[in-house]
Amino acid sequence: MEFVEDRLYAEQLLNAAAISNPGTWVQHSINVARAAEYIAIDLQKSGCEIDPNIAYTSGLLHDIGRYVGYTPSVIHSLDGYLFMINKGYEGTANICVTHSFPSTNLEAVNGWREIPSHIQIQLYEILNQIEWTIYDKLVTLCDALADDKGFSTIEKRIVSAAIRNGINSNSPILWKGYFSIKQEIEKVIQKSIYRLLPNIEESIYTDIALIGTVSK
């Protein structure tokens, strides 16, 4: 399974997508990449088979489907998957989808009913054939740790997203998914992931985003 390994190439893809659809999602992607690399380095030191460079490029490209422009809910995940599959990078393509689904309950995703049924079916089929790797888990976690301003606690990101985008009765299932991955990784590195992210304490003092969407 192929992943994008060339950082320069990954940055070129992101820059081209940013021209097609400028927005805060671009800096968010950069910060997700940084968080993934920081945590991957510690995972590697703890004996985990992981390449911090792939962790970085995977974080950088996880939202590449946003190049299309604004689409409802997690449709960008399918757009990103198809984009990377066409370039021959199945591993990176999978991450474009998996990062949106910290739970196997797809209907728990906010805005799921806004997605056309044929796209729902495609996402179901793709997710059913994916065997999650450490990169899928790590980028999913880091997506909840980084916004366009920098690093943040998961709790703050969840509350901000809930205020801006709303929630449904299944939202706590998704939240549990993030914390399950967090605990799994922390069990390996034997420390809080927050200790690995520079200046994360600054998020305590910054205002929470109340309008707009971080990824739009």
Image: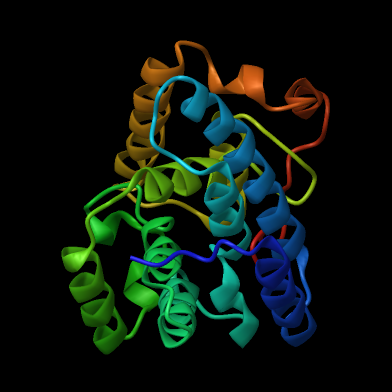
Snapshot colouring: rainbow
Compare residues 211 and 49 and report the one nearer the observer.
49
Can I make out residue 87 in this image? yes
Q: Name the residue rendered at 45%, 65% in the picture.
A: 92
Where residue 43 appears, x then y in whole percent? 48, 27
Compare residues 72 and 49 and report the one nearer the observer.
49
Left or right, 205 with respect to 99, comes to: right
Where residue 190 appears, x then y in whole percent? 45, 11
Left or right, 170 with respect to 84, comes to: left
Above or below, 201 relative to 207: above
Can I make out residue 69 in this image? no
Where residue 206 appears, x then y in whole percent? 82, 32
The number of callouts visible is 0
Compare residues 133 and 184 and report the one nearer the observer.
133
Please identify the residue farthest to the top as the structure is shown. 190
Left or right, 87 with respect to 118, comes to: right
Left or right, 184 with respect to 148, comes to: left
Q: Quadrant of residue 59?
A: bottom right
Q: Quadrant of the N terminus?
A: bottom left
Q: Quadrant of the C terminus?
A: bottom right
Compare residues 74 and 13 and report the one nearer the observer.
13
Above or below, 37 relative to 204: below
Q: Name the residue rendered at 54%, 48% in the picture.
A: 55
Q: Quadrant of residue 68?
A: bottom right
Where residue 199 appears, x then y in whole percent? 80, 25
Q: Name the residue rendered at 37%, 71% in the picture.
A: 90
Q: Name the residue rendered at 42%, 83% in the picture.
A: 82
